[in-house]
Image: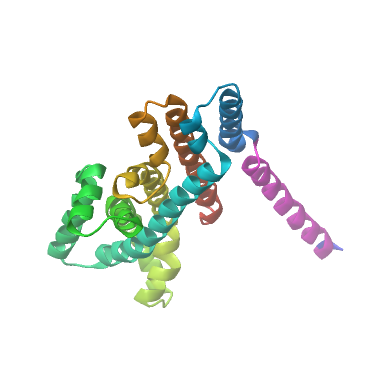
Amino acid sequence: MTVTTETQSIGAARAAGTAPARRRFFSWRRFTTPVVVAVVLALLLFWVSTLQLDSIEQRTINWSYITLRVGEHLSLTVVASALVAVLAIPTGILLAKTRSHTLRSIVLAIANVGQATPAVGVVILLAIVWQTGYTTALVALVVYSFLPVLRNTMIGIQQVDANVRESARGMGMTPNQVLTRIEVPLAVPVILAGLRTALVFCVGVATIATFINAGGLGDMIVNGLKLQRYPVLVVGAVLVACIALLIDWVAGVAEDLLKPKGI
């Protein structure tokens, strides 16, 4: 009877602990961003429906054209961010573990070049040296977004308490086990914050990809400016802003879900 009572108490305690966590995760504040984006898009659609569009505006403000440009924009953003994660996270781990200050300084200096150079400069220089098109825009996005993930990975690994490392070694863990089971999991929140920043960077810089014939919503913005078709300009700008907000929101949710328990 005592064992049964204790088991029930433990189960009740666990249920009481998880219930508030679930309520916090599914709170109304968490879904404020998508609701705001939905309202903005609805207002944009209503505003466009009240306009008398000329032939040029009709060729741009239609579902097929907008869907194509949004797809190109998301493709550039997601693929570039995935490449940044694959390249920058292992590099950051290696730099955090290396004892060579010279190597660390050289890699950080190279990564700083992409961040210090204006985004337009990176895109145009690569187009001049290489070629125009999707691949060049993708490389430019990776170069421009590399530093936040690299630096956050290094900081996340380096901020792990030395006493935690020593305790893990005292338990018989090898250096690789300490890295994979202790240091990297504890660094996940900081690494994800860097990826979140890189995603938002990519959304903004992908707008410039239109200058090298790589597509994206930048086409709408540039065409609206050149042809003085302000409905086209407004639709393109609002869509870019909404995509940035939604991607930042999704990254924030992923950050909360992937964060190790207890942190």
Which residue is most to the left?
102
Q: Residue at x 49, y 41 (%)?
A: 243
What secondary structure characterizes most of the magenta part? helix
Q: Quadrant of residue 108?
A: bottom left
Q: Quadrant of residue 105?
A: bottom left
Residue 96: x %, y % from top left: 27, 62
Residue 116: x %, y % from top left: 20, 45
Which residue is most to the right?
1
The answer to whether residue 214 is magenta is no
Q: Is residue 177 visible?
A: yes
Q: Does 50 sit above or below residue 188? A: above
Closer-to-camera residue (215/23): 215
Q: Residue at x 67, y 46 (%)?
A: 22
Q: Quadrant of residue 187?
A: bottom left
Figure coloring: rainbow
Which residue is most to the front?
55
Query: Residues in magenta?
Result: 3-27
Q: Is residue 261 visible?
A: no
The answer to whether residue 6 is magenta is yes
Residue 5: x %, y % from top left: 82, 58
Q: Residue at x 76, y 56 (%)?
A: 11
**Side of 196 relative to 140 (left or right):** right
Q: Does 218 sit above or below residue 133? A: above
Closer-to-camera residue (4/111): 111
Closer-to-camera residue (127/86): 127
Q: Residue at x 43, y 33 (%)?
A: 237
